[in-house]
Image (cartoon, rainbow, N blue to C red):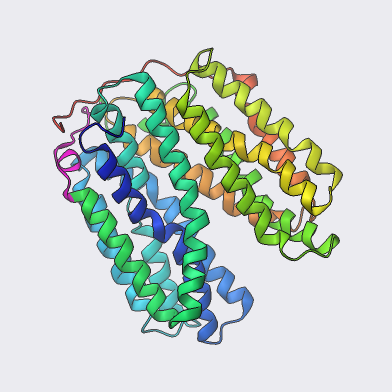
Amino acid sequence: MLRTRHVARLMLATHIGRLPCGMTPVALLFVAGADGASLAQRGMLAAAYGLAAALSQPLLGRLADARGQTLPLAGGASLSAAALAAVTFLDATRWPAAMCVVVAGLGSPPLESCLRALLPTLLERRPAEVKAAYALDSSAQEGVYVVGPLLATVLATTIAPGATLLTVTVVGLAGALTVAASPPSRRWRPQPRRDRDLLAALRPTGMPVVLIAYFCVGVAIGALNVAAAGSADRHDALWLTGALPAALSLSGITGGLVYGRWAWPGTRTTHLHALAALFALAWIPLLMDPPPVLALALIAAPGGIFLPLLTVGYQAVTDLAAPGTVTEAIGWLVSAINCGLALGTAAGGRAGPGFHLCAAAALAAALTLLIHRTRPTRPHRETSPCV
């Protein structure tokens, strides 16, 4: 799969371009802290970037479906980079800096959606290779959220916070422009839309069900941050605050690679329902508030299932998407998951410091899919002379 022309280079450039997703919120915390912002102000600034980026993905995906990938990738990355660079010259406690952060989030290029729109064509729609590519991409994406915050922290503590944010900006811009300049991206053309309905990407039967389910999955993962902090306080083990999310990510990478490596029995719909059910069941042992070492071992179960579940979700949305809406549809899935992450983190404290919200949200995702019996259709063929 990686030996196919353009695939390895595109995946590498995409993940370099995605590094700001994991690094920018942490870099903003350091920049705002250096300007004397309170903890609440710093958190709001980082959250504003994440939410703006999540909400803009469907719109930029629609632009890609209408005009090709170059404008949303190159234009969005340039706008985001300029806005983040401006933050380094402003007082982070003032509203102009906050506005620049929001603009930077809104301009965040739809690299994930664009890559997943390209892969089926690059791999000539060979199902096994497309599944393997999606799984590898999901695993690498999870690595961004492990490496990104750590790298931003190291840079911010060794060089000036403002210089860290500029470094993040340059890295993200370089990755996005590399993808935008690649022949597959420049030549990619979607299948024409059948109508001008603004909600065409959400119309296919089953699409809202999948988006709601994955919003719930995002809530479960977002609530883990608060649950980890609560568990760390109860067991007097502060290291657990960062260790639990990191362990989930690392087990997710392993699970994604294992799922993509082998062919599994059953249809894609069967995989979707089974993985959602297993994801919900995997949280149950954590409800017993296990000691730190055992909690680290138990978090491997939902973590290992999360990435395969994410992989199947992307495949399902690609299959369900109406002609001419595939990039936008993937953008909606990205937005649903990221909005769920933000809500889960915000609601985790109110729901209590345990793992109850994680389990409840995972159960809601499984029930949503199982009750509605979502059945992804066969893929629509997007025409593209990209190879």
Does residue 165 sit above or below 53 in this rendering? below
Query: In front: 168, or 239?
Result: 239
Residue 209: say if magenta: no
Query: Which of the image's four quarters has the C terminus?
Result: top left
Does residue 270 sit above or below 28 in this rendering? above
Q: Residue at x 67, y 57 (%)?
A: 243
Residue 237 on image: x %, y %: 79, 63
Residue 207 as seen in the image, left or right of residue 115 = right
Q: Which quadrant holds residue 239? A: bottom right
Residue 34 as seen in the image, left or right of residue 281 = left
Residue 227 on image: x %, y %: 74, 54
Residue 181 as seen in the image, left or right of residue 240 = left
Q: Which quadrant holds residue 321? A: top left
Residue 217 on image: x %, y %: 60, 39
Q: Residue at x 28, y 40 (%)?
A: 8
Residue 129 visible, this orientation? yes
Does residue 30 sit above or below 297 in this rendering? below
Residue 188: say if magenta: yes
Q: Residue at x 34, y 36 (%)?
A: 116
Query: Which of the image's four quarters has the N terminus?
Result: top left
Residue 138 as seen in the image, left or right of residue 75 = right
Residue 321 visible, this orientation? no
Check the image and name the residue furthest to the top. 266
Q: Residue at x 42, y 37 (%)?
A: 136
- What is the span of residues highlighted in magenta in the rendered image? 181-193
Query: In front: 383, or 229?
Result: 229
The number of discs equals 0
Residue 63 on image: x %, y %: 26, 44
